[in-house]
Amino acid sequence: MSTSVVVTGLGATTPLGGDVASTWSALLAGRSGVKRIDADWAKDLPVKIAATAAVEPAEVLPRHRLRRLDRCQQFALIAAHEAWRDAGFAYGDEDGFAVDGERLGAVVSTGIGGLITTLDNYDTLREKGWKRVSPFAVPMLMPNGSVGWISIEFGAKAGAHALASACASGAEAIGYGIDMIRAGRADIVIAGGTEAAIHQLNVAAFSSMRAMSTRNDEPERASRPYDKGRDGFVLGEGSGIVILESEEHARARGARIYGIAAGVGYSSDANDIVQNDAEGMAKAMRRALADAGLEPSDIVHINAHGTSTPIGDVGEIKAIKKAFGEAAGQIAVTSTKSMTGHLLGGTGAVESIATLLALREGVVPPTINIDDLDDEVDLDIVRGEPRELPSGPAAALNNSFGFGGHNVCVAFRRHES
Amino acid sequence: MALSEQEILSGLGEIIEEIAGVPADDVAPEKSFVDDLDIDSLSMVEIAVAAQDKFGVEIPDDELKNLKTVKDVVVYVQSKGVSA
């Protein structure tokens, strides 16, 4: 029997709040984090809305640290500190459990990396010459920069990894972290994802694909998965980090256990570079169930990828029906992207946290903005109001699908002490 | 009139606080950048660029590597300094 892996710490900074508690309460309240982009650069773009972080990193980190961290690294470090403290680990002079660095791993992914650093330094190069390019530009722009800094910050020496699978990156990081503990390479893994890509070029690039909502006059209503009037996703930013720990290690130190990271399923479509297919998504869900030793009837809730694109949302609904058959009808499905927007590489981690809390608290956040449910969405979508989950043994899935044909599904089980 | 030693020292203190997070008051002449102030080589590059902006004195890479203490920088800037 493989090692049981549990989650003992949570951290997040999102468009809804600067930590997990504020994010979770906003999710339950059905509050949108989408805002109008005030910056000049948006004025000639078709998209003028985004879900910017609720708390600016400059309010949290000292100036000298900010200047050598890309914005995505700032988010990751803030979320990691929250998760670390939440797990009861010692940091600096603070009391807490002393973690053995040789048994501590870190897996923190990003879909894009230090995009803002890259582009800002390019502007500087063109305007002022090479000497004005930051000497920290390279570690700031590299996609493994976040996990590199986190490994330094907390002394993680069992291995630090950054996996890139676009919008599945954060979920894949958690999957890899589970596997590191199962393989015996670590007792504890800091795992999650981060993104900070609300930049003119990125918005232009996604706009060019016609992938984004242009509901500029109603920012809070723009992200509306499963609604007939949905017209694309809304770009968000932020980070989610979880502390994964072998159950044996967690119990030995008397840690609080949020839930069981029961398994992960992967598939790759080998088909289209931007259009994931329903069969591939279904395969990832089936494999997650198999990996976690769960039956379809064990699943009470799915935090869906549901980005609010016309094609993608329906594809995932079809996939859930393929994977679950008759059992699909009993699953409470929600898309928290209706409130957070799409955090790209951060999304799988933030939504895994929402999935864990839904199981633990027994309540699923709603999908907001569904005025007119799409006829093709014939599953039990949690609309408008939060939904209570039954007590007792239960499990839930978090789906994440990325450009490149990456399908990742993480399975969590409720922990009953 | 050239910048005084005190003016350069306090300007350097501001730069180092901004870039490396070391309180300006700790930036005393005898302090070594690496051993006392825990400033790495990449931060030294940033400090040199900021010093050029502030004092109008360029510090070439060949010189930068010889500037080990705060006083070394003060003396270098003063020796090359143009009238303020």
Image (cartoon, grey):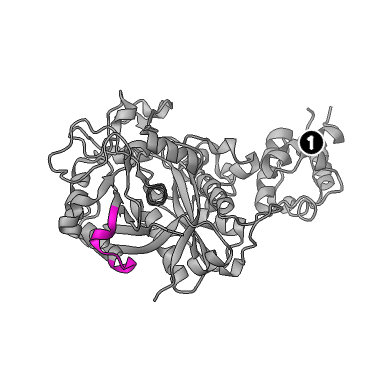
Report the front residue among A145 and A354.
A354
The spot of residue A201 in percent (x, y) is: 37, 39
> What residue is shown at x 49% (from left), y 57% (from top)?
A257
| Residue A220 shown left or right of residue A113 in the figure | left
Q: Is residue A241 magenta?
A: no
Per the rendered image, the range of residues in magenta is: A290-300
> What residue is shown at x 38% (from left), y 56% (from top)?
A171
Q: Is residue A299 magenta?
A: yes
The spot of residue A63 in percent (x, y) is: 63, 39
Residue found farthest to the top = A217
Above/below status of B66 relative to A119: below
Quadrant position of the N terminus of chain A in the picture: bottom left
Q: Residue A29 sits in which quadrant?
A: top left
| Residue B74 shown left or right of residue A318 in the figure | right
Q: Residue A378 sits in which quadrant?
A: top left
Q: Residue A57 sits in which quadrant?
A: top right
User: What chain is tagged by disc 1?
Assistant: B
The spot of residue B72 in percent (x, y) is: 82, 47
Res. A403 visible in picture? no
> What residue is shown at x 16% (from left), y 51% (from top)?
A318
